[in-house]
Image (tube, rainbow, N blue to C red):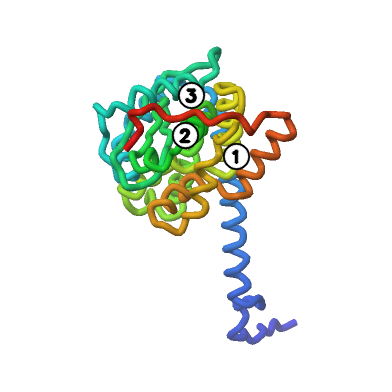
């Protein structure tokens, strides 16, 4: 029997599936796998953070302070008479059985802000102090930042930033394309937290204030005022890193009511050194 080869058609090696469909499938696969890996590594970060030695965390924080000054556009003030009261109030807001060494940094800056850096560093700007009308308001903000330190949120943010940069490196062959970008991401990770971390820090702050004063009265007044002025540039800078919306304040008040916490106590005046 004689073999007769079939005629080869030009489209024999062409897929019947549209190229765009193939591209969509490929991109979907890459994105799906990347997301799964990111989530898995995120869980790994949360498992590792509690076991990081305090000395290591302190070293990371010390190395980030200079960058935090730049981010907050501030210059450190060392001889301001308000420093001693700020440090004393911050220390007093800790639970006696679980204290960590704290360092208060006062920055001369036009940005209304307060921040926490790994290793026990709390930064407060002079413009923020200008907005504070009572010690209760000041105490809540300090306690909120203390909550981030207690929960080691800075380390968790750093871990997530590293995961992102490793993933970027694997995909594009370079860590973000520029070493400066990597450094900025790592430093910003200490100043920005997830919504759940912010909520946890809020709750920690309110509990600390109530423990300190016996009530939570006037502790949220600052944020209620700032909400009315958030269209101003310097105010929006505060809300950029601490998005205390009306809903978050309402949530804290609901938690306080549910637990029977007093939110109508007396206002504590700021010491005279805070007067302009």
Q: Nearer the viewer, residue 69 or 13?
A: 69
Quadrant hosting residue 9:
bottom right
Q: Position of residue 30 (x, y in %)?
A: 57, 57
> In terms of secondary structure, where does tag 1 sit?
helix
The residue under the point 60% across, 31% down is 216
Residue located beneath label 2 in the image:
134
Q: Cα distance, mark 1 to mark 2?
A: 23 Å
Q: Residues within 10 Å of mark 3 (few under 14, many from 20)?
A: few
Q: Is residue 12 above or below residue 56?
A: below
Residue at (58, 57) in percent of width and height: 31
- Residue at which label 1 appears: 199
Which residue bears the numbered disc 3? Answer: 52
Q: Position of residue 228 (x, y in %)?
A: 51, 54
CA gap, disc 2 and disc 3 = 37 Å
As helix, strand or loop, the secondary structure at mark 3 comes to loop
Q: Counting residues from the N terminus, which is met first, the one under dot 1 or under dot 2?
A: 2
The x and y percentages for residue 218 are 56, 36
Q: Nearer the viewer, residue 158 or 11?
A: 158
Tell me which residue sits at (60%, 78%) in the image. 14
Q: Quadrant of the C terminus?
A: top left
Give the alpha-carbon distance from disc 3 to disc 1, as whole Å.
23 Å
Rendered-image quadrant of the N terminus: bottom right
Instruction: Please say whether residue 268 is visible from this viewpoint.
Output: yes
């Amino acid at each position: 029997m004689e073999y007769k080869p079939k005629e080869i058609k030009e489209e024999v090696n062409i897929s019947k599936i549209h190229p765009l469909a193939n591209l969509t499938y490929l991109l979907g696969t890459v994105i799906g796998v990347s997301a799964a890996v990111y989530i898995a590594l995120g869980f790994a970060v949360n498992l590792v953070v509690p076991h990081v030695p305090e000395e290591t965390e302190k070293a990371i924080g010390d190395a980030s302070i200079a960058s935090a000054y730049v981010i907050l556009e501030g210059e450190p003030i060392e001889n301001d008479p308000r420093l001693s009261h700020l440090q004393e109030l911050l220390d007093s807001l800790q639970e006696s059985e679980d204290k960590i060494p704290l360092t208060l940094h006062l920055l001369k800056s036009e940005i209304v802000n307060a921040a926490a850096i790994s290793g026990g560093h709390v930064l407060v700007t002079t413009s923020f102090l200008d907005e504070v009308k009572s010690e209760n308001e000041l105490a809540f903000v300090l306690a909120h930042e203390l909550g981030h330190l207690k929960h080691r949120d800075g380390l968790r943010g750093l871990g997530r930033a590293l995961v992102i940069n490793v993933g970027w490196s694997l995909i594009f062959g370079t860590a973000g394309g520029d070493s400066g970008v990597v450094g900025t991401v790592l430093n910003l990770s200490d100043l920005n937290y997830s919504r759940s971390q912010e909520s946890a820090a809020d709750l920690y702050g309110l509990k600390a204030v109530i423990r300190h004063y016996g009530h939570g009265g006037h502790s949220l007044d600052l944020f209620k005022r700032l909400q009315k002025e958030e269209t101003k540039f310097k105010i929006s800078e505060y809300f950029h890193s601490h998005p205390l919306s009306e809903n978050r304040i309402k949530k804290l008040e609901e938690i306080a009511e549910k637990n029977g916490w007093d939110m109508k106590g007396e206002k504590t005046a700021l010491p005279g050194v805070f007067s302009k």
